[in-house]
Image (cartoon, grey):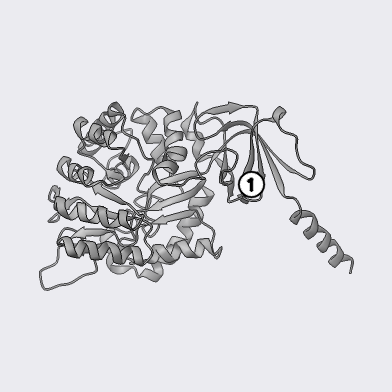
């Protein structure tokens, strides 16, 4: 009886603590850094963000002291593949051809947890890469609290022009599973967009260019009228299109069609990036993917000279910064290890972006680009997706990898 009574008392005590006060050394609110601020969380919502002197702490509030820490909004990852794992473990072709959707879903549950523990509280997943709508179901299991993980925005299978995607390298009599869903012609692309949205995709990813044969240079894939039709179809349903594009012409067609973000953009020119800026289109450079792939191919970073791929990426990213196009944080994680999303932030700084702008990109800007009205800022009325990192990320961006506290939707997952 005494044990039962003690447990009952514990339950009543913990369940009636409606407020949590977070007291760090400093707070990045999604826009700027503040000293001597605190955050009060009630339920799953931020009820106060400001100086400690401006708050009358409610009775029964639980206080969490985060000495030496920087509090900030949960990281919003803009380009991920939860159903992929690093290509130096298993190359992309073999993941698509030899790993079942069941195996990949199980891997995805691990990847989702690792991401959350690394401070990523929201992820935009840009394609199941041959695993159908497994990402849609992964999202559901997280929302149903079956497994821990970030809030997900998922693209489902993604859409490619017929003949333009892989795996490739087989003779014409062999049919293999593809990493995305092929479509051609205006009626067919409209039907494909509608089917994917009906099956649970939050947005549609298209490939505006790709390699038509293995090892060849990328070329445009969809015609302008096909892209126009897909964007119009998605917008009619209240959704949007994002585009994989790395060539100037592929990027131009995507821009003219009205996509909301362009992914990779390796061949982007100053003219193209300025056109994106003028149209309010975000640019997700995925620096970490190229860095990782170059290392998989034998580049000893810090020892060997930069390979051509890295040199060109640095140059195009410099042009993007010069154009002032909105930079979307997203590293193409899955190409490299889930939970190491910070690699992209470190490279953004290494390639010339200011640390403050990097933090904005990974929080409030991504929230704005992805239509997440109550995320990305530590502000009264916003959802309590909050993390703390050791140290001061504006002085050392590497601090972002030292995540010591994670709260998502008011629930603490790491402390």
Can see residue 338?
no
Quadrant the N terminus occupies: bottom right
Find residue 323 and report its image quarter: top left
Q: Give x and y (percent) for residue 183.
A: 19, 63
Which of the two residues, 212 or 261, is positioned nearer the viewer here? 261
Q: Position of residue 169 (x, y in %)?
A: 15, 62
Name the spot of residue 160 as percent of width and height, x first: 21, 58
Q: Residue furthest left?
A: 172
Residue at 34% across, 35% down = 326
Q: Is residue 195 above or below residue 68?
A: below
Which x, y percent locates residue 225?
15, 53
Q: How many marks?
A: 1
Q: Is residue 117 left or right of residue 333?
A: right
Which residue is drawn at the image coordinates 47% and 56% (left, top)?
112
**Residue corresponding to mark 1:** 415
Residue 136, image quadrant: bottom left
Dot 1: few (<14), some (14–19), or many (≥20) neighbours within 10 Å? few
């Amino acid at each position: 009886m005494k044990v039962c009574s003690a447990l009952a008392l514990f339950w009543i005590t913990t369940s009636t603590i409606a407020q949590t006060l977070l007291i760090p050394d400093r707070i990045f609110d999604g826009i700027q850094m503040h000293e001597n601020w605190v955050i009060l969380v009630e339920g799953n919502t931020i009820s106060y963000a400001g100086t400690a002197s401006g708050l009358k702490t409610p009775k029964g509030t639980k206080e969490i002291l985060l000495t030496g820490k920087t509090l900030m909004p949960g990281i919003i990852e803009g380009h991920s593949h939860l159903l992929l794992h690093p290509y130096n473990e298993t190359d992309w072709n073999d993941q698509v051809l030899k790993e079942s959707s069941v195996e990949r879903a199980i891997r995805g549950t691990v990847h989702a947890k690792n991401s959350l523990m690394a401070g990523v509280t929201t992820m935009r997943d840009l394609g199941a890469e041959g695993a159908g709508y497994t990402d849609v179901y992964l999202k559901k299991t997280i929302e149903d609290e079956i497994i821990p993980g970030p809030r997900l925005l998922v693209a489902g299978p993604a859409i490619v022009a017929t003949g333009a995607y892989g795996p490739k390298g087989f003779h014409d009599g062999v049919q293999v599973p593809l990493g995305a869903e092929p479509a051609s012609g205006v009626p067919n692309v409209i039907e494909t967009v509608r089917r994917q949205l009906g099956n649970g995709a939050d947005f549609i990813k298209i490939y505006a260019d790709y390699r038509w044969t293995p090892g060849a240079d990328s070329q445009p894939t969809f015609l302008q009228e096909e892209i126009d039709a897909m964007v119009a179809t998605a917008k009619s349903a209240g959704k949007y299109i994002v585009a994989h594009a790395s060539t100037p012409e592929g990027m131009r067609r995507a821009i003219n069609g009205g996509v909301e973000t362009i992914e990779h953009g390796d061949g982007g020119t100053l003219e193209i990036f300025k056109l994106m800026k003028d149209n309010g289109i975000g640019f997700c450079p995925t620096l970490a993917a190229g860095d990782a792939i170059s290392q998989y191919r034998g580049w000893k970073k810090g020892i060997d000279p930069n390979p051509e791929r890295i040199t060109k990426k640095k140059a195009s990213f410099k042009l993007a910064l010069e154009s002032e196009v909105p930079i979307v944080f997203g590293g193409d994680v899955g190409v490299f290890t889930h939970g190491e999303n910070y690699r992209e932030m470190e490279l953004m700084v290494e390639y010339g972006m200011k640390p403050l702008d990097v933090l904005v990109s990974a929080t409030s800007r991504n929230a704005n680009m992805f239509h997440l009205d109550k995320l990305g800022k530590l502000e009264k009325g916003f959802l309590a997706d909050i993390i703390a990192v050791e140290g001061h990320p504006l002085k050392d961006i590497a601090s972002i990898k030292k995540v010591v506290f994670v709260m998502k939707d008011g629930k603490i997952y790491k402390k």
